[in-house]
Image: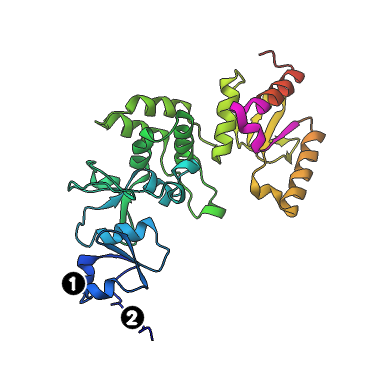
């Protein structure tokens, strides 16, 4: 009959090192029990599921300077990343420490100099702060994806839904951070900041805007509320008031019957006041936004734009 493994000390988290386990009185034989798994040599897990934060907390037991950085910190902080950098796809966790460490297939180590103001604490897990993380992403992202990250940092939040009233950073915050940095990669960061705009609410909206501007279409207003004769026409994702043309990008949240009904009523109000609304979906963003460019260019020209 298989014996039930003895309980582990409550001091051990979801992920723990062998050294921490031995210090808590756990034997080497207990670490080989079937209810535990090995993340890598010297690093163990309870059960099958664990997070990057669990790994960082475990490693900090013997090295307090360990923190998450790069794409991993960005994902934990909710910054927009392409799916190719998702931990679930890469199976890689990016960390930094003041001590030299050798990277493995899962743990990718970096040697960064981190200022105290660049550190973010999250329940015992340390990671690089948002501005510093954005700067470290320059080597991992395309120019457009980097703009999307900066748009995310400088956008004005919606307090009702997000529980905050200030942006994560201002354009000036980013400019100062880039200018004061001594690392390489400042040129692409400056170029991305020059193209970033306050007001973009999603990576899809950023991608749409960049495709349109690259095609010679005027820079649109972003999520600015429109009033006509005292009637609230909402906040179009992108709009050109001079020609009364606007774009609404339909993401997954717009597919519910309730939201769809609201969107249809809003489109009717806009049409009644002379506005031409274009609705885009994911297909419009493919091939460099070719379909979106075609439709928006046609709409603007129908309203007198001569670009």
| Residue 23 marker | 1
**Residue 133, placed above or below residue 215:** below
Q: Residue at x 69, y 13 (%)?
A: 306
Main secondary structure of the magenta stretch: helix
Q: Residue at x 73, y 18 (%)?
A: 301
Secondary structure found at label 1: helix
In the figure, residue 110 lies in which quadrant? top left
- Tell me the residue that label 2 is attached to: 5
Q: Mark 1 vs mark 2: which is more N-terminal?
A: 2
Q: Residue at x 70, y 16 (%)?
A: 305
Q: Position of residue 281 (x, y in %)?
A: 67, 38
Q: Quadrant of the C terminus?
A: top right
Is 68 left, or right, of 76 in this rendering?
Answer: left
Q: Which residues are magenta?
A: 276-292
Q: Position of residue 161 (x, y in %)?
A: 56, 54
The answer to whether residue 135 shows anywhere in this view is: yes
Q: Mark 1 packing: few (<14 Cα in 10 Å), some, or many (20+)?
A: few
């Amino acid at each position: 009959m298989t014996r039930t493994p003895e309980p582990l000390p409550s001091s051990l988290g979801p992920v723990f090192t062998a050294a921490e386990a031995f210090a808590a009185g756990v034997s080497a034989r207990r670490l080989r029990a079937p209810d535990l798994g090995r993340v890598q040599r010297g690093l163990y897990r309870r059960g099958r599921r664990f997070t990057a934060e669990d790994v960082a907390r475990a490693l900090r037991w013997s090295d307090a300077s360990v923190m998450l950085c790069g794409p991993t910190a960005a994902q934990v902080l909710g910054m927009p990343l392409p799916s190719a950098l998702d931990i679930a796809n890469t199976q890689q966790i990016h960390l930094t420490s003041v001590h030299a460490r050798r990277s493995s297939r899962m743990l990718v180590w970096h040697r960064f100099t981190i200022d105290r103001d660049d550190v973010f604490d999250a329940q015992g897990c340390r990671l690089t702060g948002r501005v510093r993380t954005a700067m470290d992403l320059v080597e991992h992202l395309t120019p457009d994806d980097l703009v999307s990250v900066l748009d995310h940092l400088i956008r004005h939040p919606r307090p009702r839904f997000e529980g905050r009233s200030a942006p994560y950073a201002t354009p000036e915050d980013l400019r100062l951070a880039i200018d004061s940095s001594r690392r390489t990669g400042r040129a692409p960061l400056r170029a991305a900041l020059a193209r970033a705009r306050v007001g973009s609410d999603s990576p899809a909206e950023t991608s749409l805007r960049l495709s349109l501007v690259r095609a010679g279409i005027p820079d649109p207003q972003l999520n600015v509320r429109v009033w006509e004769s005292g009637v609230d026409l909402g906040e179009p994702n992108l709009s050109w008031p001079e020609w009364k043309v606007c774009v609404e990008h339909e993401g997954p949240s717009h597919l519910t019957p309730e939201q769809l009904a609201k969107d249809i009523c809003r489109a009717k109000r806009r049409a009644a006041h002379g506005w031409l609304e274009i609705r885009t979906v994911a297909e419009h963003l493919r091939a460099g936004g070719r379909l979106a460019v075609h439709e928006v260019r046609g709409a603007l020209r129908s309203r007198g734009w001569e670009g």
